[in-house]
Amino acid sequence: MQRAALLDAARSLLSEGGTEALTFPALAERTGLARSSVYEYFRSRAAVVEELCEADFPVWAAEVSEAMRRESSPEGQVEAYVRRQLALVGDRRHRAVVAISASELDAGAREKIRAAHGGLVAMIVEALREMGHAEPRLAAMLLQGVVDAAVRRIELGAAEEPESITDAAVAMALRGVTG
């Protein structure tokens, strides 16, 4: 239960203040534990981040996968892939994953995050193949780049409304720069 409370506190800290806010004293304060007790559960900040990624990324990916599964056409699946990821931007778990990806992590944690993102990209490859892309894996990686750019735009609180950014990302995904 303490480990779960620490992870929940870490999500909140990352969501509220980014990676700089994720400190062992802050975790101890949020959970009511002694600072030394936090070290009993995690050896470093990177270990907290790694465990958050292991816990939260599969849930996030499952939500994207479920949204895609409900669509019958490959175009609908691409749209669901983009829309569901962008809808998750306001979710605390998503904010934590975004903050995690921006943080200074050890090589092992970075590799786990890279593998998790690879799994997300792999979800859309078949739909892109069905749409006739000659290189569906490359197209999937580029599509994820569009999603990532839209996420950053939403996270920055850009002048456009999140719905407008989402619609533009979907249009880019389905029709390219021709709109």
Image: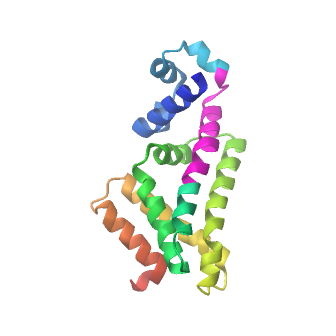
- Whether residue 14 sits left or right of residue 36 in the image: it is left
Q: Main secondary structure of the magenta part?
A: helix
On whether residue 179 falls in the magenta region, the answer is no
Q: Nearer the viewer, residue 56 or 145?
A: 56
Q: Locate the N terminus and report the quarter of the image it occupies.
A: top right
User: What is the x, y in percent for residue 171?
Assistant: 41, 77
User: What is the x, y in percent for residue 30?
Assistant: 45, 22
Which residue sits at x=42%, y=53%?
Answer: 89
User: What is the x, y in percent for residue 84?
Assistant: 46, 61
Looking at the image, is 51 positioned above or below residue 98? above
- Which corner quadrant of the image does residue 167 belong to? bottom left
Q: Nearer the viewer, residue 159 or 85?
A: 85
Looking at the image, is 100 positioned above or below residue 129? above
Which residue sits at x=61%, y=50%?
Answer: 58
User: What is the x, y in percent for residue 28?
Assistant: 51, 18
- Whether residue 39 sits left or right of residue 154 in the image: it is right
Which residue sits at x=39%, y=50%?
Answer: 90
Q: Locate the C terminus and report the quarter of the image it occupies.
A: bottom left
Q: Which residues are magenta?
A: 41-61
Tell me the colour scheme of the image.
rainbow
